[in-house]
Image (cartoon, helix red, strand yellow):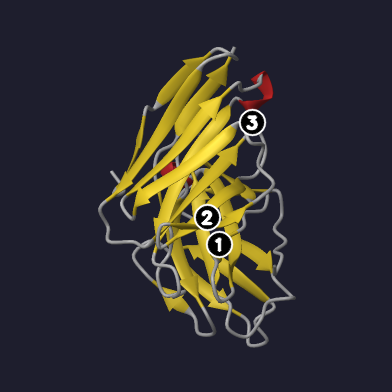
Amino acid sequence: DAKTTQPPSMDCAEGRAANLPCNHSTISGNEYVYWYRQIHSQGPQYIIHGLKNNETNEMASLIITEDRKSSTLILPHATLRDTAVYYCIVRYRNYNTDKLIFGTGTRLQVFP
Amino acid sequence: ETGVTQTPRHLVMGMTNKKSLKCEQHLGHNAMYWYKQSAKKPLELMFVYSLEERVENNSVPSRFSPECPNSSHLFLHLHTLQPEDSALYLCASSYSGTAVYGYTFGSGTRLTVV
């Protein structure tokens, strides 16, 4: 399974952009990068995913490097409600199984 | 609500009890998953069901017994648990076989074994 590496914690001022990095140097050509977040004691919430190209939705933007070995999740205007643990995951698939393997994630603290 | 409903939200059980956790989805997904999250630890994948067939069991003790009677329902039967089994148990569903869609998680069942 492709592994990911994230910093354990980050701080961000409210209203500023939060840039969360992730390394996935062993990613395979057909594996997608997913980002989820988990607010305290709730189920993880899907944010965004991508394969090669940069992606944007109403929640965030995902920037994937050309060699696909790393990516950055961008929350353009962080709010206090964005305080959570953010997980970068490479979705593992073979012919009969499909799974998301979570790491330890980055704990993002947004402060006033 | 995410479309994946877990019941009960909270459960306290003794070590000799038998209980079941329930997960239900009406998103048309064909794969369902059980995860365990112990305090200050990452989510651990326990079981994977694809098209109602168990395709993965990650060395989970036999005191946890999953059941998937159809593509919309998933159960986790619990018996003779230990205090270290206290955790948040999360259910998720997805379209297996395509990476286009993400997983949808329920809110979890907070289990306390006394």
Q: Secondary structure at mark 1?
A: strand
On residue A99, which mark appears? 1
- Image x and y of residue A106, in percent: 64, 51
Q: If the image is split into quadrants, where does the N terminus of chain B sit?
A: top left
Q: Is residue A77 visible?
A: no
Figure check: B113 above or below A87: above
Q: Residue at x 63, y 33 (%)?
A: B38
Task: Say which of marks 1 and 2 sits in front.
Answer: 2
Label 2 to label 3: alpha-carbon separation: 22 Å
- Image x and y of residue B19, in percent: 46, 23
Q: If the image is split into quadrants, where does the C terminus of chain B sit?
A: top right
Figure check: B51 above or below B67: below
**Mark 1 vs 2: CB contact within 8 A:** yes
Q: Secondary structure at mark 3?
A: loop
**Displayed quadrant of residue A24:** bottom right
Instruction: Name which residue type carries label 1.
Output: Lys
Residue A32 is left or right of residue B42, and the answer is left
On residue B39, which mark appears? 3
Instruction: Name which residue type carries label 3.
Output: Ala
Residue B90 or A87: which is nearer the viewer? B90
Residue A2 is left or right of residue B43, and the answer is right
On residue B48, which mark appears? 2
Residue A81 or B72: which is nearer the viewer? B72
On residue A36, which mark appears? none
- Image x and y of residue A15, in percent: 44, 52
Task: Say which of marks 2 and 3 sits in front.
Answer: 2
The residue carrying pointer 3 sits among few (fewer than 14), some (14 to 19) or many (20 or more) residues within 10 Å by Cα, namely: few
**Mark 1 vs 3: CB contact within 8 A:** no
